[in-house]
Image: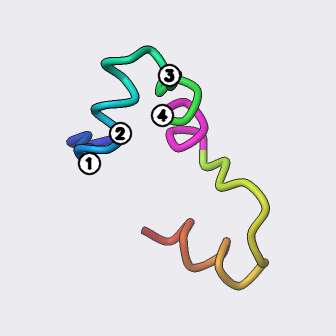
């Protein structure tokens, strides 16, 4: 997956246990981009 970075806002959510980041990292790792257009999905999967 490469280097994982986060914003200060996300870091605050993690520190307060307000965000389960693993679900989002797992979705990213498997190419689950959520509800996006076919064009955007095709462009995203090429990177």
| First in residue order: circle 3 vs circle 1 | 1
- Secondary element type, mark 2: helix
Q: Residues within 10 Å of mark 3 (few under 14, many from 20)?
A: few
Q: Mark 2 touching mark 1, by CB under 8 A?
A: yes
Q: Which residue is pictured at 56% across the width and 66% down the height?
A: 45
Residue position for label 1 = 7
Q: Mark 4 touching mark 1, by CB under 8 A?
A: no
Which of these two is toward me, 2 or 18? 18
Find residue 18 and name its label.
Answer: 3
Is residue 6 part of the magenta span, yes or no? Answer: no
- Indicate whether 45 appears above or below 14: below
Left or right placement of residue 38 versus residue 1 in this view: right
- Of badges 4 and 1, the one in the foreground is 1
Residue position for label 2 = 10
Query: Mark 2 to mark 1: distance in Å?
Result: 5 Å
Q: Residue 31 appears at what percent x and percent y?
A: 60, 49
Q: Residue 24 appears at what percent x and percent y?
A: 55, 35
Q: Mark 2 touching mark 3, by CB under 8 A?
A: no
Left or right placement of residue 33 versus residue 35 in this view: left
Q: How is the image coloured?
A: rainbow
């Amino acid at each position: 997956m490469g280097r994982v970075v986060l914003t200060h806002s996300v870091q605050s959510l993690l520190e307060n246990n307000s965000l389960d980041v693993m679900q989002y990292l797992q979705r990213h790792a498997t190419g689950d981009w959520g509800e996006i257009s076919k064009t955007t999905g095709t462009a995203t999967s090429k990177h």
